[in-house]
Image (cartoon, rainbow, N blue to C red):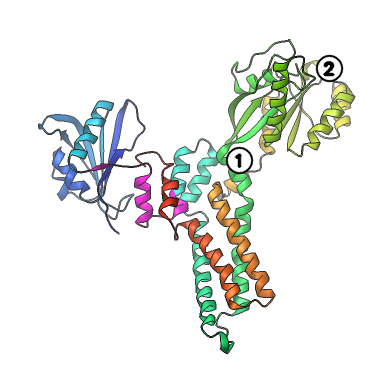
């Protein structure tokens, strides 16, 4: 472990509050803080202890009464000496403390620099480091569980072990290159092939989980479409329990898309209300309908709402054919449940040949059934509830697929009797991807790109 120059930043959210925490980490962090502190001698205190006192300015005036917690290396988040100063949450006080620290030679931290130091000091690997940011940003039960699984090791620990086995085989394959004319084989080909197959068996569920992970992290773009006056805006308002969209009996009231978020069973749905699908009566409505069609193309889930009282069988069949042809997961929702007979419902259900969720948007009837149907269209719970690792990062997905493709080429070459130099080339590519994934191979640009997205103080 090593300690870099001392850095400091506000570790709690900016803004006025009851309490704020200023974090200091690096060489001399405890001694520097002690020079500002009036209370116990911090340099003589044990790790993981808290001490009450005051912080002083250069004129020995009191800045604030504070509680200082001492963490000694390597038993801290960064594995450096760390001090956390809990003060009152005044912006003025916070700035006075940071200013005083910088006067003593402490540098203000860059975004994510504390977590970056923790990674560089071996506190966790790069996948786990990125999970810290995901955990802070988690806004649903599913995203929280996914980030927590990654923070605790997720798939990275398993891949690191397999990567080390692959490194050992690559070393033997490359050793064969030194004895090329003697036709010796140090790396047993059957064992190498089995290892590559084992790694790919680990990779495939992770690669497949990215579609689920993307939903968990970014939410499910869910577009509500239908004919004018089907009740789309009323449904959006009912689901959100607020008057988000204008409701009117005049067809074509909604001219632009309206978006908001709804959490169902721990999953974030990005609900999008759209202009009614029909022949436009003016230029503005035409633009709105075009945007509706665009949102349908971009959506992960389409909710087609129809007026069960006034829809004709032919119109409904045409709609169903159009939704099916889009290739998107969809849900058929019949509105005005309170005004139609069971016979009419059965007739329409027979036409579409599949289940229809019946609701009354105006009277908010059967909305729980609709929410259940929505969540059933998004398959996330099984993977996340069991604690299985789910890939939520495009960077992770890129390296996992790169590894898998390199190993597939290596297996093909192995079966075709490829020479050790060709075999080693594909294996090196696989190792490069695995190393960049977990952070065993890094560049300054990569680290800068990852940690710059963190909040300052973390």
Of callouts 2 and 1, which one flags the residue occurring earlier in the amino acid sequence?
1
Local secondary structure at mark 2 = loop
State whether residue 416 is above or below residue 243: below
Q: Is residue 90 visible?
A: no
Q: Which residue is mark 1?
A: 215
Q: Front-most of 413 and 377?
A: 413
User: Can you tell which mark lies on residue 66?
Assistant: none
Question: Which of the 4 image quadrants contains residue 247?
Answer: top right
**Nearer-the-camera pick, 148 or 34:** 34
Look at mark 2 in the image and give the residue it sits on: 310
- Residue 134 appears left or right of 92: right
> Percent x, y for residue 30?
20, 47
Q: Quadrant of the N terminus?
A: bottom left
Specify the quadrant that holds the C terminus: top left
Asked if one can make out residue 42 in the rendered structure from this viewpoint, the answer is yes
**Residue located at (30% from left, 39% from top):** 9
Dot 1 lies on which element?
Answer: helix
Residue depicted at x 54% and y 47%: 393
Which span is picked out in magenta? 106-129
The answer to whether 406 appears left or right of 135 in the picture is right
Residue at the left extreme, as displayed: 59
How many neighbours does mark 2 have within 10 angstroms: few (below 14), some (14-19), or many (20 or more)?
A: few
Number of numbered callouts drawn? 2
> Which of these two is toward me, 175 or 389?
175
């Amino acid at each position: 472990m090593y300690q870099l120059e001392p850095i400091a930043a506000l570790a709690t959210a900016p803004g006025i509050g009851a309490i704020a925490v200023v974090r200091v980490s690096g060489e001399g962090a405890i001694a520097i803080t002690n020079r500002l502190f009036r209370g116990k001698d911090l340099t003589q205190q044990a790790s993981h202890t808290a001490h009450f006192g005051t912080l002083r300015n250069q004129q020995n005036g009191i800045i604030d009464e504070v509680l200082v917690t001492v963490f000694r290396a390597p038993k801290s988040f960064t594995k450096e000496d760390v001090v956390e100063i809990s003060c009152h949450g005044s912006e003025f006080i916070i700035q006075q403390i940071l200013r005083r620290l910088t006067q003593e030679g402490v540098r203000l931290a860059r975004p994510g620099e504390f977590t970056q130091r923790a990674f560089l000091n071996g506190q966790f690997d790069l996948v786990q480091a990125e999970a810290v940011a995901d955990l802070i940003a988690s806004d649903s039960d599913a995203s929280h569980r996914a980030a927590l699984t990654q923070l605790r090791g997720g798939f990275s620990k398993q891949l690191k072990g397999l990567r080390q086995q692959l490194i050992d085989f690559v070393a033997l394959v490359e050793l064969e290159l030194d004895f090329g004319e003697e036709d010796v084989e140090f790396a047993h080909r059957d064992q190498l092939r089995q290892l590559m197959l084992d790694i790919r068996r680990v990779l495939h569920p992770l690669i497949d989980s990215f579609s689920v992970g993307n939903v968990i992290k970014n939410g499910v773009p869910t577009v509500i479409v239908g004919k004018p006056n089907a009740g789309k805006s009323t449904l959006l308002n009912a689901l959100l329990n607020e008057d988000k969209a204008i409701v009117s009996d005049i067809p074509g009231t909604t001219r632009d898309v309206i978006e908001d978020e709804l959490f169902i069973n721990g999953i974030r749905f990005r609900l999008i209300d759209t202009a009614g699908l029909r022949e436009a009566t003016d230029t503005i409505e035409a633009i709105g309908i075009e945007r509706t069609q665009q949102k349908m193309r971009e959506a992960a889930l389409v909710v087609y709402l129809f007026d069960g009282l006034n829809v004709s069988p032919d119109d409904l069949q045409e709609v169903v054919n159009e939704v099916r042809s889009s290739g998107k997961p969809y849900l058929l929702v019949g509105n005005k449940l309170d005004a139609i007979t069971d016979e009419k419902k059965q007739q329409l259900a027979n036409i579409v040949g599949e289940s229809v969720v019946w609701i009354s948007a105006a009277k908010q009837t059967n909305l729980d059934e609709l929410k259940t149907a929505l969540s059933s269209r998004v398959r996330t719970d099984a993977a996340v509830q069991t604690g299985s690792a789910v890939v939520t990062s495009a960077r992770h997905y890129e390296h996992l697929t790169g590894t898998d493709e390199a190993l597939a080429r290596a297996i093909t070459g192995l079966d075709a009797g490829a020479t050790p130099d060709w075999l080693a080339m594909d294996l090196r590519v696989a190792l490069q991807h695995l190393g960049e994934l977990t952070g065993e191979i890094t560049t300054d640009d990569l680290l800068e790109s990852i940690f710059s997205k963190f909040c300052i103080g973390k």
